[in-house]
Image (cartoon, helix red, strand yellow):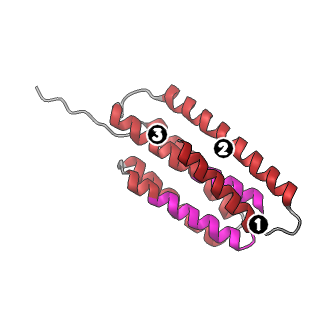
Amino acid sequence: MLVNVDHGPPTEGIAATAVAGALVVVALGAVSAVGGGLAVVAVLLALAGVVRPSRQVIGAGTAVAGVGLLVAGFGGAPPEPLLLGAVGTVLVWDFGEHAVGLGEQLTADTDATRNVAVHAAASVAVGTVTVGVGYGVYAGATGGQPVVALFFLLAGAVGLAVALR
């Protein structure tokens, strides 16, 4: 008897990635047409990487979102949407990677609602604290500092978070 097992990502993981992607698109699209367009491409790439499990495609989508953040930041976007877009980008990557990992370990039919919800809540909590600290540093240090300085500060925080993961 032959058993066919689908090791695709659970639907809940795909949905979480899509919601985080919508945050990126809205945040960047509100301040930059080019940044918003890149965010749309980034989210579509990341979702394709989740649906057809490919960590490289998820990473490529995340990189395109990073370029969208740079374009919006250098275009003079205010820090708030940049921070939301940056956190959304990290969440897209994190949720996508988590969904692919669940698909490798379980099957697509497994009820992963609780697992995805707990992971998402923890990631959003970390992102919220990161945004709060980043914005607090920006607000305390803005004595004519460019928004690009905030972006590089946030990029360092994201790099640290990835390194600690």
The image shows residue 111 at horizontal and vertical percentages of: 43, 26
Q: Mark 2 touching mark 3, by CB under 8 A?
A: no
Boundaries of the magenta span:
60-89
Query: Residue at (52%, 26%) from the top-left corner?
Result: 114
Query: Residue at (40%, 35%) from the top-left corner?
Result: 102
Decide: is 111 above or below 157.
above
The image shows residue 19 at horizontal and vertical percentages of: 58, 46
Disc 1 marks which residue? Answer: 147
Observer able to see residue 48: yes
- How busy is the neighbourhood of tag 3: few (under 14 within 10 Å), some, or many (20 plus)? many
Name the residue type under label 1.
Val
Any mark on residue 127, and which? 2
Q: Nearer the viewer, mark 3 or mark 1?
A: 1
Observer able to see residue 36: no
The residue nearer to you, when weighing 68 against 161, is 161
Query: Residue at (85%, 59%) from the top-left corner?
Result: 141
Is 130 part of what is drawn in magenta?
no
Q: Earlier in the sequence, mark 1 or mark 2?
A: 2
